[in-house]
Amino acid sequence: MEPIPRSGLYYPNKIARLALTALEEVMGKNGLNAILNLANLNHLIANMPPDNLERAFDFADFSMLNGALETMYGQRGGRGLAQRAGRAVFMEGLRNFGALAGAGDLAFKILPLTTKLRIGIPAMAKIFSSTSDQLSTVEEKDDHYVYTIHRCPVCYGRHTEKACCHMATGLLQEGLKWVSGGREFRVVETNCIAAGEKTCDFNIYKEPIS
């Protein structure tokens, strides 16, 4: 794969570590090592980023990781793996971040679903905007929310025909499940920077599918 030039934009080490750990759980150590080799990230083999919030993991590396999944497993297979990894990233770490830590409390659990979403979706955006160089905003529409990533680490520097930020989709799906107390929601990426749009936009439909 062609390397992506450094972006000068960073994720905290912890989120990158969670993503790599999630991929290892999904595809095994050998599978992860093959992906890291393909993504020109072999320095990370048996050498995970430290478990801290220092902004030190370049968006270019995170994007290469996601691109390598699609290159190795094809569009559909790569999408499935990336979504599973995104869900695991949320489950393993992000739900304990400050902005969402209260979502497990009884006072939050008894709120109506519409209120949970109105509080929880911007809280997810806030985690990324406050701990990384990923800027995220949320806008409420009639039947859905639009979750917008203005600087996206998942597709940074890549060019694709279709929306490709599957890890972000999985992360949002699992975040919504946590915030809502176990419901599943439809999340669709409608615009993608890699496909030529200005932002990566995700429609989160208010009506749960289960």
Image: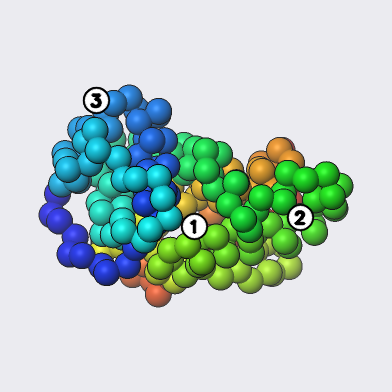
Q: Quadrant of residue 27?
A: top left
The quarter of the rendered structure image containing the C terminus is top right
Q: Is residue 167 left or right of residue 114?
A: left
> Amino acid under label 3?
Asn
x, y percentage for residue 127?
55, 60
Where 99 falls versus 176 (above or below)? below
| Residue 56 tag number | none
Name the side, left or right, on which 183 lies relative to 26. right
Tell us which disc is closer to us: 3 or 1: 3
Residue at the spot 65% in from the left edge and 53% down from the top edge: 100
N-terminal label among 3 and 1: 3
The answer, for residue 160, to whether it is visible in the render is: no
Image point 72% across, 61% down: which residue?
119
Earlier residue among tags 1 and 2: 2
Q: Residue furthest bottom?
A: 198
The residue singled out by tag 3 in the image is 30
Q: Which residue is mark 2?
A: 116
* Spot occupied by residue 14 in the image (x, y as percentages of width and height): 41, 48
Does the residue at mark 2 contact the one at mark 3 (Cβ under 8 Å)?
no
Mark 1: secondary structure: strand
Labelled pair 3, 1 in contact (Cβ < 8 Å):
no
- Alpha carbon separation for disc pair 2 and 3: 40 Å
Q: CA distance from mark 3 to mark 1?
A: 30 Å
Q: Going 43% across and 55% down the picture, which residue do you hit?
A: 53
Type of the residue with mark 2: Lys
Mark 3 surroundings: few (<14), some (14-19) or many (≥20) residues within 10 A:
few
Label 1, residues with CA under 10 Å away: few <14, some 14-19, many ≥20: many
Which residue is under mark 1?
189
Q: Earlier in the sequence, mark 2 or mark 3?
A: 3
